Image: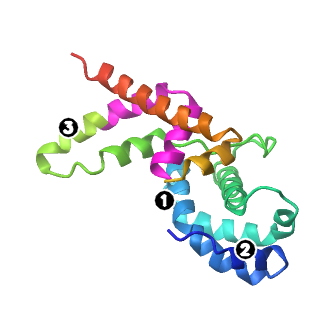
Amino acid sequence: MTAIDDVLLERLRTGDDSALGPIFACQRDKLLRMVQFRLDPRLVGRIDAEDVLQEAYVDAQKRLSAWRADPRPFHVWLRLVTQQTMVDIHRRHLGAKMRDAGRDRMAPQSQSLSGFLVGTMTSPSQAAMREELKVQLEQALQSMEEIDREVLVLRHFEELSNKEVAELLGIGENAASNRYVRALGRLKGLLSRLQEP
């Protein structure tokens, strides 16, 4: 993952729209992970994460003038555009009722998280254990508050820095760090209770 080049960012801010392509490419892996963890399972087979990124790129191109007036860092703004693109795709494909787009969020899917967590268990002897653990993880994740799942996804799975999480959630860096540690502790506690006989 490459950091956004400051020269490219300045070119984009001062009106050079052609700088969006290389900047988007720098953020692509992070955006792809975000989409993969948040895409509604009912959309599998209809659309994939790459399709979402293509639409998000087009949406970002259309909204560049809005970004130039936005005080948020570009990576935060781009992530919000991508998330709004996902909301629009969800509405289009699943016929969701229209609401205030600013209130819609694509929450992390517990099925995606649990699948990722147990995905490294590959031996044949672990197949049954993997499925059982996946179900337990899904139950544990579903019982957590949405903000806890969000922090876990942002930090652990999307690999965002603590500063980036704080910017996205609109909280201080210490608060973001504390939430992450607490969310990990809660998940560990829930899993240990699930495994008790």
Say what secondary structure mark 2 lies in.
helix
Relative horizontal placement of residue 24, taking residue 60 as reference (left or right)? left
Residue span colored magenta: 134-158
Disc on the earlier residue, 3 or 2: 2
Q: How is the image coloured?
A: rainbow
User: Does 135 lie within the magenta span?
Assistant: yes
Q: Amino acid at mark 1?
A: Gly
Q: Is residue 188 above or below residue 110?
A: above
Instruction: Give the CA separation, mark 3 to mark 1.
Output: 27 Å
Q: Is residue 31 above or below residue 109?
A: below
Disc on the earlier residue, 2 or 1: 2
Q: Rate crowding at label 2 as few (under 14), some (14 to 19) or many (20 or more) other CA atoms within 10 Å.
A: some
Main SS, magenta residues: helix
Given contact means CB atoms under 8 Å apart, are the residues at marks 3 and 2 in contact? no
Q: Amino acid at mark 3?
A: Met
Residue 185 figure quarter: top left
Question: Residue 105, how many percent across, how many down?
Answer: 67, 43
Say what secondary structure mark 3 lies in.
helix
User: Does 141 lie within the magenta span?
Assistant: yes
Label 3 sits on residue:
129
Say what secondary structure mark 1 lies in.
loop
Given contact means CB atoms under 8 Å apart, are the residues at marks 3 and 1 in contact? no
Do we see residue 47 in this rendering?
no
What number is the disc on residue 45?
1
Given contact means CB atoms under 8 Å apart, are the residues at marks 2 and 1 in contact? no
Relative horizontal placement of residue 196, taking residue 178 as reference (left or right)? left
Instruction: Give the CA separation, mark 3 to mark 2.
Output: 48 Å
Label 2 sits on residue:
9
